[in-house]
Image: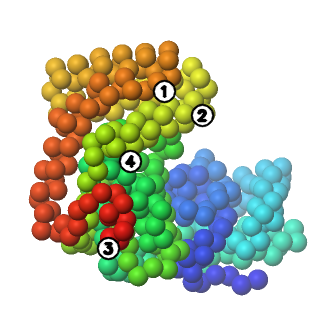
Amino acid sequence: MNNATDARALLAAGTPLIDVRAPIEFTQGAMPAGINLPLMNDEERAAVGTCYKRQGPEAALALGHKLVSGERRQQRLDAWRVACAAHPQGYICCARGGQRSHIVQAWLRAAGVDYPLVIGGYKALRQAAIQATFDEVQKPLVLIGGCTGSGKTQLVKQRADGVDLEGLARHRGSSFGRTLSPQLSQASFENALAAELLQKSVSRWVLEDESRMIGANHLPECLRERMSQSPIAVIEDPFELRLTRLQDEYFVQMHQAFHAALGEEAGFAAYAEYLHHGLYAIRKRLGLQRFAELDAALTQALTVQQSSGTTEAHFAWLVPLLNEYYDPMYRYQLEKKAAKIVFRGSWQDVESWL
């Protein structure tokens, strides 16, 4: 059994981590290959923490062993053994590689399972992730720009040197950007980004020209700074082609995703709420009168879609939304970056140029 000291190598290898921290700690920040099987649940951890402050470490340790004993201990031990068998190359991880991971390691050893732990725990992994991101983004960056519906994400995703920031953030970056998967905490997003960068052996990075925020997540400052200095290739596809892409992504695929997750009736209701919410989020920028008109057109389009299965009626609100809001906003933002634009062309032209 060799306990791990090279946190960066674990991230680069995508090594499975049996994370024995409490669920609240895991939610606040975790590694993408982490599997949360806590030694103590949130309530037990809180009780032990209070005991530690009032009575000291020995009393806290005794309380911990009392809380996690008997059938409860056996259930957790069984879960760890199953995880160890499923991930023979994995490691145990706690907050700092201290008492919790050592206790779990000792209990497993007593049960006949020899399983290593991460020296320094999550804290060491987190520091390795932060440093890895800083190091990796020193490589040359090329940004892909273009109005909504230009296929930027598709282009980035298909490339070996591409990093899909929106995929990692679980958000497409606009007011309609949320997906069915909730966004990760900021730390977990940054950890996933670091692992993605480490797991690709490339000489440059191709990224979408993102703003600082992607939904609730923000880009690490070192990456944002590098992006602000990087060249931009702009996709300029015909409006009709962009509409077709948006129709498929937002009206066909999103409807299918909600349907698959929630069933026909509840799925359509959630899909309708998602579209209405996206429009509502920008109502002040549209002006309340224009918002009311577009929202009425959206309601009518949903009625048509639900009765006929067709999605073309959505163009009645999507086309003016693009013409009056998204396209002018993006072109204004792009004008401010004009000095960094090094190429313009169709999706295929930009792909070939890259």
- Please tell me which residue lies in front, 55 or 71: 71
Earlier in the chain: of badge 1 and badge 4, it is 4
Q: Residue at x 81, y 65 (%)?
A: 85
What distance separates the C-alpha of mark 2 from that of mark 3?
A: 37 Å
- Please tell me which residue lies in front, 315 or 339: 315
Q: Amino acid at mark 3?
A: Leu
Q: Residue at x 32, y 28 (%)?
A: 315
Q: Amino acid at mark 1?
A: Ala
- Helix, strand, or loop for circle 1? helix
> Is residue 215 in sight in this rendering?
no
- Of the numbered discs in the image, which one, if any, rests on residue 198? none
Q: Residues within 10 Å of mark 3 (few under 14, many from 20)?
A: many
Q: Badges 2 and 3: C-beta atoms under 8 Å apart?
A: no
Q: Amino acid at mark 4?
A: Arg
Earlier in the chain: of badge 1 and badge 3, it is 3
Q: Determine which quarter of the picture holds residue 212.
A: bottom left
Q: From the image, tell me which residue sits under label 2.
A: 261
What distance separates the C-alpha of mark 1 from that of mark 3?
A: 38 Å
- Of the numbered discs in the image, which one, if any, rests on residue 270? 1
What distance separates the C-alpha of mark 2 from that of mark 4?
A: 19 Å
